[in-house]
Image (tube, coloured by chain):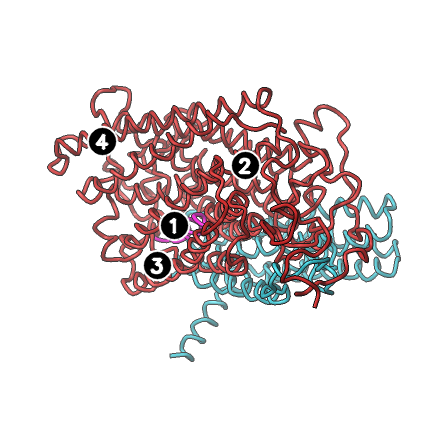
Chain colours: A red, B cyan
Amino acid sequence: MVDVTPADAVPPAEVAEMELYHPHSWWTKYVFSQDAKVIAVQYSATATAIGLVALMLSWLMRLQLGFPGTFDFITPEAYYQFITMHGMIMVIYLLTALFLGGFGNYLIPLMVGARDMVFPYVNMLSYWVYLLAVLVLVSSFFAPGGPTGAGWTLYPPQAITSGTPGGQDWGIILMLSSLILFIIGFTMGGLNYVVTVLQGRTRGMTLMRLPLTVWGIFTATVMALLAFPALFVACVMMLLDRLLGTSFFMPAIVEMGEQLQHNGGSPILFQHLFWFFGHPEVYIVALPAFGIVSDLISTHARKNIFGYRMMVWAIIAIGALSFVVWAHHMYVSGMNPYFGFFFATTTLIIAVPTAIKVYNWVLTLWRGDIHLTIPMLFALAFIVTFVNGGLTGLFLGNVVVDVPLSDTMFVVAHFHMVMGVAPILVIFGAIYHWYPKVTGRMLNETLGRFHFWVTFLGAYLIFFPMHYLGLMGVPRRYAELTDMNIMTESAHHLNSFISIMAFIVGFAQMVFLFNLIWSIRHGREAGGNPWRATTLEWQTPETPPAHGNFGKDLPIVYRWAYDYSVPGAKEDFIPQNVPGTFGPSREPA
Amino acid sequence: MSVILVFLLVIAGFAGWWLSHQRLTAKPWLEQGVAGDFVGFDRSSLPTAKIGLGVFLAVVGCLFSLFTSAYFMRMGLSDWQPLPLPRLLWLNTGVLALSSVALQCAVVAARRGQVDTVRLGLATAGLTALAFLAGQLIAWRQLTEDGYLLASNPANSFFYLITAMHGLHILGGLVGLGRTSAGAWNGTQRERLRLSVELCAMYWHFLLFVWLCIFAVLAGWAATFVSICQRLLT
């Protein structure tokens, strides 16, 4: 109905051209590059590399759980170190870095129609500080005493006492230093992502025309900027407790018959700080996944996203609510039960906007022209997995259910489904979707389908049985599960089965990595817009996009990002930078 | 965690105000054409660097709110013994305020294009900021000499930790100020100089504000104020 200006009356782009940094040598072009696209690839490669380490660690853990007593080198101490590093790497160094540093850097400038991030130098610095954080983390594997085994939540007092691996050695110090570096590096990058969305948008790109991917990454970055300081504060204070003998978190404690000098500190204070970061972190990972999956579904079902406004509002609502649910991770910490009631309520409320998003994805699929491409398969798998994991989250959000289940495998199954498997499925879908833009070639279809089915079915075979183990009362965080009444013969068989599935799924990831590398040279030529998508990154003059992204003139945006199958239009998609009005209901009044 | 929640409420209020100006109720599927022509719905007219600094200051504010939150939570435990603040902190506060004033003068001069006054303002601000840092170090020293060591009481630990964090932020600001000063002496373009002086001033005023807040917290006035409010409410 509302045709804002006749298309032919549009003056040329009035967006001020940014001064683009031009690399002069091979080093500044590919290594110390200030181009967001190169930084994105650097972020993704580093995150994948450290993610592989975490994958190996999960194999080692499964070896121990599935076949207890068979492998001598997996001592209880080593098991705890594997658990800790696996969790920390996956949540922070892989998922956060890949979604925000990887996809954020690649997609934000291209999708909003900018030449680059607004502060390219700071952006480059962000990656190098991140790399340093990863190196410090890796170095803890080689430090005397090995990495910390405090669990990924690093709860004091055990995190810095001598009974815990790395507690009185280098492990915990390197872990905390690495996190502090990560947060500093992330803040540099995060400033870029936020300000680029605010200020870098091309002409015509209003907030309500942004693809949901950008909305998701943008909101997640704002949340991360506000939540990571809590982890920073917790890390700095714990570092002081460990190194200088302060008592922020450390109560009076007797260790190996010796009274430590700490006195009166509060471990609960650490839990509050940690989860004030930790819960938003779940959504920092989930919101970019929500955004990306919306775009994948819309593109591959050739249909506009259902309820775009509702999707945007839901993202904002989730972002805001996620800051008032943190203590539902602390029901068993002995805090005031009234707090528990409050946090259970907010936890249930946050399910409402999340459910709205799920309904809208399903309604987008309804009567769509669904193409079962690999990105679409992953997107569909995400919806199913996220619903599964989210529903058990509703169980655990209630105090009375959480208290008995809190220390069991049920929780492990829940969070792996909802924040492990689900976001990773989106990452895979997104890689299959955008790889042609990054490299100019398609990933191999056959290998891709193999990868999808093994990963999807395998992940269910791993984590579904874990729920049953949890309901039986099988505890988590135990290195040895033999000689326990609850560990029946069948429970042991189930554990072995889970372990074997974990190896198979891990193997499928190697196939995926092979596909990634092989297709750079041998993949089918993709062309500029293989999925016939509407968003700006597919409309670049070159593929892969050159430095500066859009050639001589920045694109002008005339429509929202979801003009698929518009009645009356020649093609079933209208890119955002195509002028003119289409569709019977859109004739100027 | 109330301090950080109040801080986030302020941020949320600001974000809500901004979002309410962004036509979030628009129906983008019905609108074709260059919607950016609606006045005020596109990017802000403020310089991008200022918005970037604003976002960064929100993060810094968040950091100090969290330290303050932790301070109040730890304060409630039994082993807390407040330490007497050195009188020198008052002098330091004055010096830091002077630094801010000097930078504000530099901003005014930069807007008028008086490069000499800008240089004078920048130099004064830099020197007074350094004096502030030196003063903080001396205050630390006085405390340690009086036996208030870092690890002997959580009140002391928080005092050293929070003042150190604030000092580090000042130090970081001095790097920016140094670069601005180098520009002022080497004759950068006038608009550019004005922007970077304004950025420095913005950062300085914010850190002065943070210092006043944490001074109030460390001196115990904030706790008194809160308890008075609580008594009024109950």
Of marks 2 and 3, the one in the foreground: 2
* Residue type beneath disc 2: His
For the residue pair A9 and A500, the one nearer the viewer reads as A9
According to the picture, the residue beneath numbered tag 4 turns out to be: A495
Q: Which residue is mark 2?
A: A433
Q: CA distance from mark 1 to mark 3?
A: 14 Å
**Amino acid type of disc 1?**
Phe
Label 4 neighbourhood size at 10 Å, few (<14), some (14-19), many (20+)?
many
Q: Is residue B110 above or below residue A101?
A: below
Q: Is A346 included in the stretch rendered in magenta?
A: no
Tell me the subunit letter for badge 1. Answer: A
Chain name for mark 2: A
Placement of the C terminus of chain A among the 4 image quadrants: bottom right
Q: Confirm whether the magenta stretch covers residue A269.
A: yes
Residue A479 position, x and y percent, is 24, 31
Evaluate if marks 1 and 4 touch, with contact meaning CB atoms under 8 Å apart: no
Q: CA distance from mark 2 to mark 3?
A: 54 Å
**Residue A83: mark:** none
Q: Quadrant of residue B81?
A: bottom left
In the image, what residue type sits under mark 4? Answer: Asn
Q: Nearer the viewer, mark 2 or mark 4?
A: 2
Residue tagged by mark 1?
A270
Chain identity of mark 3: B
Q: Give the residue number, with chain letter if any, for mark 3.
A: B77
Amino acid type at image mark 3: Leu
Element assignment for label 4: helix
Give the quadrant of the N terminus of chain A.
Answer: bottom right
Disc 2 and disc 1 on one polypeptide chain: yes
In this rendering, which labeled residue sits more in front, label 2 or label 1? 2
| Residue B86 appears in the figure | yes
Q: Which residues are magenta?
A: A268-284
Q: CA distance from mark 2 to mark 4?
A: 35 Å
